[in-house]
Amino acid sequence: MSTFLGILLALLALVTLIVIHEFGHFIAAKIFNVYVNEFSIGFGPLIFSKKRKTGETKFSIRWIPLGGYCSMIGEDIPEMTEEEVASLSPSDQELYSLYKTLPPNRKLNGISRWKRCIILLAGITLNFIVGYLLFFFYAIDVPVVYSYENYVQVQEGSLASDPERTWSSDGSGWTNEDIIIGGEYIVTIDNVETERNTFNSSSDSPEDKLQLYYAFNEALNQAPSTANDNVKFNLYTLDKDVIDLTVNAVDNNGTLSWESIGISFVPITRRTTPSEWFTISGRMFGEGCGAIFVALGQIFTPEGFSNLGGIISIVQVSTMASSIGAYYFFGVWALVSVNLAIFNLLPFPGLDGWQFVVTIIEGITKKEIPSKFKTIMTYIGFGLLLTLFVVVTFKDIFALF
């Protein structure tokens, strides 16, 4: 049931981001009084449509969840002869008739170009805003690991719990209350000191706080060569106590290894502070945008294509994220929202970036690009995007097996 709910939650999140994107176009169009004919979630064959009796816009849901669209009157509608109009479907004839009868200020191609640019970029802008807000929610909820030296966990019956093997200056032995702030270890192999290292984990530096954890692994990384080999630890606790521990080599059926110490280092976590919310969310937003641009630059390389994922991959990652925690879920969908914004910003036929570039070019040259050319390029772009969607979907399916 948890997996099913995770998948359902991922699909709901994906649809929500698409709705938000198209809602940006819709709101901007309404602000400038442009007639919105249809607000659609998805492409392809129609599943459901609804139009209020007193409203102008038809709201619809379609089968291909690759995106959606906000169809505005005056958006790449070419001039037609009576014969061409007669050959259209009844719904397209109605749309063309509406286009001819509406005043220019209610058509997308009848308003000023700076207003068109705002409408075209409104969906992208909303996705960027939502992406940042989700990163912000991530920063609020994410636990911060700020100490790896705190509170050593000692296993009952282990070497570390044996008072005869673990010497303490106050005679209490090694307990779970000890907070190690530094120390030294000495590795002796074949009666020769091969390594001596000191470490400090008492500062606020994350690197210093990790030194204790790494010191134990580093000290026991050398394999013993004789049964007389040992590693001696001299550790210092927060209350100035001293703990000495010697780890000897043991023979397990002819294989030499070190004794199991029986301790672990528990990371102490805290919640982020309000000042950190802005720092973390801003950093992640910038890093997320940068990573997406790098990925787009590598998309036609073998490595880039292997990392390419579609809806199935998104659902998989989102389902895993929802099982880890809300903060991870927020982080994943923040990245998806930013990804959606940047992808739509590309100057590729069929995407918002393409229409934005065309509008800018027309504004600079003071000449309209033929509507038929723009329509043909849009259809070509949609075809290529649909092909990419199918290829990536099959790639995701094959990866499941």
Image (cartoon, rainbow, N blue to C red):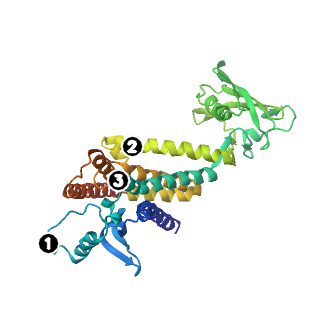
- The residues bearing labels 2 and 3 have C-alpha atoms spaced at a distance of 32 Å
Q: Is residue 103 above or below residue 349?
A: below
Of residues 121 and 114, which is closer to you in this image? 114
Q: Which one is earlier in the sequence, the residue at label 1 or at label 3?
A: 1
Of residues 100 and 143, which is closer to you in this image? 100
- Horizontal side of 331 relative to 191 (left or right) equals left
Of residues 190 and 295, which is closer to you in this image? 295
Task: Tell which tag, 2 or 3, sits nearer the viewer.
Answer: 3
| Relative image position of residue 22 (x, y in whole percent) | 41, 62
Q: Residue at x 59, y 54 (%)?
A: 137
Q: Which residue is mark 2?
A: 295
Q: Which one is earlier in the sequence, the residue at label 1 or at label 2?
A: 1
Type of the residue with mark 3: Arg
Type of the residue with mark 2: Ala
Dots 1, 2 in contact, CB < 8 A? no
| Relative image position of residue 138 (x, y in whole percent) | 58, 52
| Relative image position of residue 199 (x, y in whole percent) | 69, 27
Type of the residue with mark 1: Glu
Of residues 233 and 345, which is closer to you in this image? 345
- The residues bearing labels 1 and 3 have C-alpha atoms spaced at a distance of 30 Å
Q: Is disc 2 placed on a helix, strand or loop?
A: helix
Q: Which residue is mark 1?
A: 82
Q: Is disc 1 placed on a helix, strand or loop?
A: helix
Q: Which residue is mark 3?
A: 113
Dots 1, 3 in contact, CB < 8 A? no
Q: Is disc 3 placed on a helix, strand or loop?
A: helix
| Relative image position of residue 30 (x, y in whole percent) | 42, 65
Quadrant position of the C terminus in the picture: bottom left
- Horizontal side of 208 relative to 60 (left or right) equals right
Residue 227 seen from this side: yes
Q: Mark 3 Cα within 10 Å, few/some/many (few <14, many 20+)?
A: some
